[in-house]
Amino acid sequence: MTGAAVGESEAGSYRDAYFVNRDGLKIHYRDYPGDSSKPPLLCLPGLTRNMRDFIEFAELHSPRFRVILVEFRGRAGSDYDPVPARYNPMTYAGDVVELLQHLEVPGAIFVGTSLGGLVTMVVAATAPQLIVAAILNDIGPDVDPAGIGRILTYVGRDPRFKDWDEAASTISGNYGSAFDRYTHDDWVKMAKRNCREENGEIRFDYDMAIAEPFKNAGATPQPDLWPLFTALAAKPLLVVRGEKSDLLTAETAARMQSAAPQMRLAVVAGVGHAPELNEPEAVAAIDELLGTLG
């Protein structure tokens, strides 16, 4: 560990800390206290996102569960990688395995949003003993090209905003009309999770180089992710899908259900990619899954 700090939340104290991975990069994580007799919840964010997406989730579930929030390399408090080609799910999965080893956690309940869900599937195929159960948030082994196309319109660009209202308007535009429930204040809250203040400006809080392998992937044949999902399907599994998602289609979700009959599926109405996991449909489904795990 290269540093740690203790903070306070509605759930009580938490610890912000770092570990140094095999590539010499500091990876930031936040650790909320919880019942040591239960496996912790391990939260993995989306492509351009960070641990702030899971703070409300952590405060909801700690201290009934220990909750660990991870920031992938190149995001927010974690070091940027000087080799952009390493920004890929296999590398992130290796970092997650190293973190659990660092914390001496033998197994966790993985909660993966979008990219975080892909990383969860990689871990299921490479280190299945580490996954006690999983929650995939709006992601599956098939990703709709329409959603990829939308993400490509903004990922890796580095606009600067004069205030949070301007940032909120831009982010709202990136998501189109996929969130019926959102007011302008909700978009401001999302902007504050996505962005940071720097030198009197507001900018997105990730290394723009994460876009390089993501964009280059379009020129190569896409790997078949169904074997990874099949590995994960052996675990207790919940899939949360936004009703208006342009990444996880209803057809793919139905195929996942057929491949994993014990899988729970929760659909969040009026929401696109990706649910925040604080919606009543998501909260009820997550509580049901966690209840089955004791």
Image: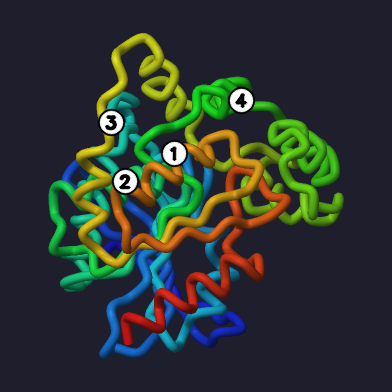
Give the structural element (helix, strand or loop) at label 3: helix
**Which image quadrant: the N terminus?**
bottom left
Along the polypeptide, which appears first: circle 3 or circle 1?
3
Amino acid found under the numbered disc labelled 1: Thr
Identity of the residue drawn at 41% across and 74% down: 289
Q: Is residue 89 above or below residue 211?
A: below
- Residue type, mark 4 in image: Arg
Which of disc 4 and disc 1 is earlier in sequence? 4
For the residue pair 41 and 188, the one nearer the viewer reads as: 41
SS of the residue under disc 2? helix
Residue at the extreme top of the image, as rendered: 219
Marks 3 and 1, Cα distance to the nearest angstrom? 28 Å
Residue 195 visible, this orientation: no
Q: Which residue is mark 3?
A: 86
Q: Is residue 171 left or right of residue 259?
A: right
Displayed quadrant of residue 280: bottom right
Crowdedness near tag 2: few (<14), some (14–19) or many (≥20) residues, C-alpha within 10 Å: many
Mark-to-mark CA distance, 1 and 4: 19 Å
**Residue 150 numbered mark, or none:** 4
User: In the rendered image of this protein, does residue 93 appear above or below residue 17?
Assistant: above
Picture quadrant where residue 73 is located: top left
Callout 4: SS:
helix
Label 2 amino acid?
Val
| Picture layout, residue 65 above or below residue 283 | below
Question: How far apart are labels 2 and 4 at the CA level?
Answer: 21 Å
